[in-house]
Amino acid sequence: MSPEFIIASIVTIIGLTTPILLAGLGELITEKSGVLNLGVEGMMLMGAISGFVITALTFNPWLGVIGAAAGGALSSMLFAVLVLQLNSNQVATGLALSIFGTGLSSLIGVSFTGRIVPQFGSIFPDVLAKDPIWKLFFGYSPLVYFALIMVPLTAWFLKSTRAGLILRAVGENDHSAHSIGYSVTGVRYAAIAFGGAMAGIGGAYFSMVITPMWAEKMTAGRGWIALALVVFAGWRTGRLLAGAYFFGFLMWLELFAKANGFGPSLPFIQAIPSQFWAAMPYVMTVVALTLISSRGNVGASAPACLGKPFLPST
Amino acid sequence: MQTPPRLDLSGITKRFPGVLANDQVSFAVQPGEIHALLGENGAGKSTLVKMIYGIMQPDAGEIRWNGARITIANPKAARKLGIGMVFQHFSLFEAMTVLENIALGMDAKIPARDLEAKILSVMQQYGLKLEPHRIVSTLSVGERQRIEIVRALLLNPNLLIMDEPTSVLTPQEVEQLFVVLRQLAKEGCSILYISHKLHEIKALCDAATILRGGKLVDTCDPAKETSRSMAEKMIGGSLKDIQRGEGRALGSAKLAVQGLSIPKDGPFGIALKDISFSVKAGEIFGIAGVAGNGQNALLLALSGETPSQNPDAIQIDGSKIAALTAKQRRLAGMASVPEERNGHAAVPDFSLSDNAILTARDRMGMVSGGMVNARSARTYAGEVIAAFSVKATGPAAMADSLSGGNLQKFIMGREIMQKPQVLVVSQPTWGVDAGAAAAIHQALVDLAATGSAIVVISQDLDELLSLCDTLAVINEGHLSKPMPVAGANIEEIGLLMGGVHGDPNAPTHISSEVAHAY
């Protein structure tokens, strides 16, 4: 294995990891408030098309990212109103949001198919960003650094801020939080909107960074992987980061196996069909879940009210 | 000029669809007074305090605070006035630390370190022991209540509302709580104390307001009343004593439990350790203990939901049943009623007659050739409703449409009318009003009189002392040596209940006042 191959692999893995890391952090916050939003895939696609359209219209990728966050957050509000105001079933509504987001993004995208949008420039000088070795640290899209900064920020928010404490309290025991005088519904709206915005930015990574073009369903199921990632991480931020890279590595193996013949140095990967590697993130999630439950939930901190509607008693 | 009352309610009225929860309720709480609010379930106590704490708004009437007319928009506004509340069902977050739980109850943002110092000083001042960094799920019920009390005290309350605070405490914990409450009252804090335990009110309170059916019945001085006179005001009729037949003789041992051990299920479960006792025909055997000491595991082991590896561990009339399933044990003559009504003893979305089928199908012949005989189920459910005066629209009523007390009467009736040889019940009158509780107690006594052996698992020591012939205490999965109730030593029972769960700094004896109250 040449150093070039290793660097290229790491760059690919970081690229594959960023969207699921962004969407996973958003979903982590949403789930910590006690809401299970299975609409991540739909919100990612809505973010991807919103970011793409805004960039195509303004020729400014930074405005595009803001548009992607807004697109994701707006579509999540549809879910929020149904779930929080009308107490609809969270699983069914989340699935509906995924289907809806997939369809609506395709519809909006029809007139933008084939267009190419301007991409982010490098935020570091080319001496570093284009250097064959230093690009390992400085050669990424701003969204990659944004995702990495959001990891400690999210951890700090949940652990050390009062707002984070209230968010966890709402997810842990909504009735108690209500009786103390916190607005359960208000907190959950905010958490769902944040989850939507982060999923939107994660989706924009596909339409604005990986390729500067729009394609239907271009997130290719990464929203589901982001959901699995949150469970895999046991609702902990540090493990979410580690898990995201682990899943990123598994996705890289899939690409690698598909590319076949990339290098004879890893024959065992080629010997196994790429579908096996594509299934690995989900298989690993099942394994992790089994381990977590068989060891009596050690280390996992699933919010106690996850997925349950809040119905205040009169 | 005389100081105005701390809290003065006049003409408070609250209407819910179809029910008048509070009807023109007026009373006053003086500064430094411990004021009891008494009433059966559904008398309107909770609604009333929810309005005082700002969770609900009255439809009519006025609230005066230190003489000034006010509206309390929400709990935050209540806390700002200096009204603290300790809920019956703790509003705690199990997966969080004591410190985080207390921080959540504070309206102002206080740095964690300052808050910890404040908590420690309050705990020292009132002798409330707590470890700020413990996770709540690892704490006993008494410790959890202390969190709520510390949380309320940090706000320097002028009025502290306590909603049935002693229902889950050991006698020693009750005594410690009373010390704290008296100290608070001496410092000028008013306390509104909700309870239906009359001896506690006599021991603690300066005044008592009694509600019945949403209306104020009386405001009286508990020192001048007897427990009986207050109870009769509460239920609006004369209280029936348990009627026991003359010259009752116990038969031979019917239920024998010998060396029953069950490993714990899950990380928070309690293992049963070498439990042995026997219950004679006609005997009512009580098992006391603080919640979470293995009562649940014991009920499941006796009912057959958790069969034992050792078939000899449980015997009825000499036949070994410990390896049998719940269904087989029912056929062998054993019936059981678990603690949780909704979802364990009964299916909330099922009608009463469907719920009757669940446990009575074999003994009452409701199933033949794999087919359910719906008519006999309806008939049986109707008989239970009539015999136990269950307030329900009929056998077709959904279980969750019944109040807790009525559903409990139905469930108890469903088992008792199968005339089981052995009946095991857990918390038979938990959350049930005095009238229904008396009916359930009477039914148990009557069943015992027919020669059945009865095991009652309860956290309510008063209940066990008035109902049972023999008593044992469960603590950490161990069962103490059984003792006859006649001549039982309350202090000893309290210490057995405290056991490992108790506070090591608890007084080693309880004052004659509380001991006497039991």
Image: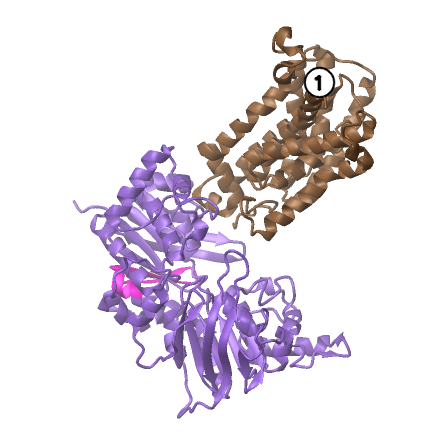
Identify the image quadrant of the N terminus of chain B. Answer: top left
Q: Is residue B238 visible?
A: no
Q: Is residue B280 above or below residue A302?
A: below
B199 within the magenta span: no
Q: Quadrant of residue A208?
A: top right
On the rendered structure, is B444 left or right of B491? right
- Secondary structure beneath dot 1 equals helix
The magenta stretch is: B200-220
Chain letter for mark 1 = A
In x, y percent, where is residue B91? Answer: 44, 49
Q: Is residue B503 above or below residue B478?
A: above
B215 within the magenta span: yes
On the rendered structure, is A234 left or right of A228? left
Residue at (65, 37) in percent of width and height: A229
In x, y percent, where is residue B371? Answer: 76, 75
Chain B representation colour: purple
Q: Quadrant of residue B477?
A: bottom left
Q: Quadrant of residue A161?
A: top left
Q: Which chain is brown?
A: A
Residue at (80, 24) in percent of width and height: A262
Residue at (67, 23) in percent of width and height: A10
Q: Amino acid at mark 1?
A: Glu
In x, y percent, where is residue A163? Answer: 47, 33
Given residues B115 and A193, the one toward you in this image is B115
Q: Is residue B507 above or below residue A140?
A: below
Residue where numbered disc 1 is placed? A4
Given residues B72 and A20, the one toward you in this image is A20
In x, y percent, where is residue B13? Answer: 42, 52
